[in-house]
Amino acid sequence: MPQLGETVTEGTVLRWAKKVGDSIAEDEVLVEISTDKVDTEVPSPIAGTILEILVAEGDTVEVGIDLVVISEPDEEPSSAAPAEAVESAAEPAPEPESGSEADVHPAAETPTGPETGFEASVTSDVTQTPPTDAEVEAFFAEPSSEKPSPQLLSPVVRRLIRENEIDLAQIQGTGQGGRITRKDVEAYMAAAPTAVATPAPAPVTPATVPEPVVSPPASVGDVAEPERATPAPAVGVGSEEVELDRIRVRIAENMIKSKQTAAHVWTSVEVDFEGVERVRQAHKARFKSEEGFSLTYLPFISRATIDALKAFPVVNSSFYLEEKKAVFHKKVDLGIAIDLNQGGLVVARVRNADGLRLVGIARDIRALAERGRDGKLDLDDLTGSTFTITNPGPFGSFMSVPIINLPNVAILSTDTVVKRPTVITTPDGQDTIAIRHIGYLGLTWDHRALDGSTAVLFLRKIKESLETWDWEQELA
């Protein structure tokens, strides 16, 4: 499983483009993988023949786990290769020395009763030590018609079996060739919540028994049934139950992870966009004629933000508390949130945005938005941003509080710019009320990585640039 992004830790196999026995060329599409960032086609690193597929479609495994066995380009594959691999994997471990841990749990010995080895360890009293990886491997190595072959269990399935002390003989595999999948294990766990034995409670003396609580009568089934989560409400008349698509599931998972990880704080400033608006009006017809799209506020805000990121590099960093480190990025790869026609939201990257002028930024943002809505963004487009801007303003938002796009430490929200009466100071120092184009910028920032003074100064830098820069020279 390749590392498909800086923060990606696992991937789900969506589709194998080849099957066992097929030939494949180097860089030919081998498998389609879904991550929390993007669904992407992964090419084969070598030419050869597919000898064995180790992870089934629909299974999720961690980065670094083997997915497939491919012969070397100059290797002559044989039909017996997969079988030989199975026999090799099933070789019993050498006899342990007396007094070793294996003596306590003799998983590799020949079974002599109904509960031996790994099966005994998962069905015996819970006070015993859970089975080790070695015991699990030894159990898989034992020949039995009731046990799946070792090559047919993914690492995720093995981990679930080990952590939850499950008897494999009780699970009916629904995968290819009777293979036990992750879904099979999870379904078994959901259907048999009492599979793991619990020690009987110690007897309580009459003196310590509390007064009984009067409650409505319960059926026998209610008494025996353990406490469960509240069931989902039934779908009422006029309602429809739908399956969540992958992008909605990924968004949900990423948003929860961000809220649980980063210390979110929100700060905002009011900005007078009058100077920007006058330049837009003066150049919008020529710009649209030359570029083919409208000149919006977003490129102006992006240009001012890039300048502020250079002045406050901590806002253009990534924060890793567990490793006790922060990474300060030398360049600005600007992330732009793109709405996929209300079908989801992705963050696409403007590469080396600090080397672009306003028109170049506008072009790149437009190109990313079009490719995103056409479903043509690739993995490189969707990873590697160092700071993110989300732009709900065109939809009419007043103030927004976005969620940080990890591992970024902040995200800027650009809201609607409207005409409002406000107090301005004339060149001769007199205060007066004028109609101006006013908008708000909101910054959600990670208090683990920076403090309030930095966040406010960063926003003030953007505000001052938008209000005072000579924007004419950016469009000249």
Image: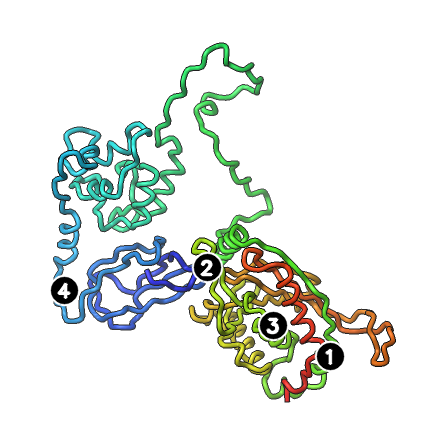
- Closer to the eye: label 4 or 1: 1
Query: Which tag is nearer the camera, tag 4 or tag 2?
Result: 2
Q: CA distance from mark 2 to mark 1?
A: 41 Å
Q: Nearer the viewer, mark 1 or mark 3?
A: 3
State the SS at label 4: loop
Marks 1 and 3 sit apart, C-alpha to C-alpha, by 19 Å
In the image shown, does 456 or 144 lie closer to the viewer? 456
4 or 2: tag closer to the N-terminus: 4
What element does badge 2 sit on? strand
Q: Say if 228 sits above or below 351 in the image.
A: above
Disc 2 to disc 3, C-alpha distance: 23 Å
For discs 3 and 4, the disc positioned in front in the rendered view = 3
Q: Is residue 409 left or right of residue 162?
A: right
Label 1: which secondary element:
helix
Q: Residue at x 21, y 32 (%)?
A: 104
Say few, some or many: other residues with alpha carbon within 10 Å of mark 4 (under 14 / 14 to 19 / 20 or more): some
Secondary structure type for disc 3: helix
The residue identified by callout 1 is 275
Which tag is nearer the camera, tag 2 or tag 3? 2
**Of label 3 and label 4, which has the lower sequence position?**
4
Indicate which disc, 4 or 1, sits on the residue closer to the N terminus: 4
**Which residue has dot 2 on it?**
325
115 lies above or below 34: above
Above-or-below relation of 211 to 455: above
Q: Pick whichever, 343 or 112, lies toward us.
A: 112
Q: Could you tell me how far apart the alpha carbons at marks 3 and 4 are, in whole angstroms?
A: 59 Å
Indicate the amino acid at tag 3.
Answer: Ala
The part of the image, by quadrant, that contains residue 293 is bottom right
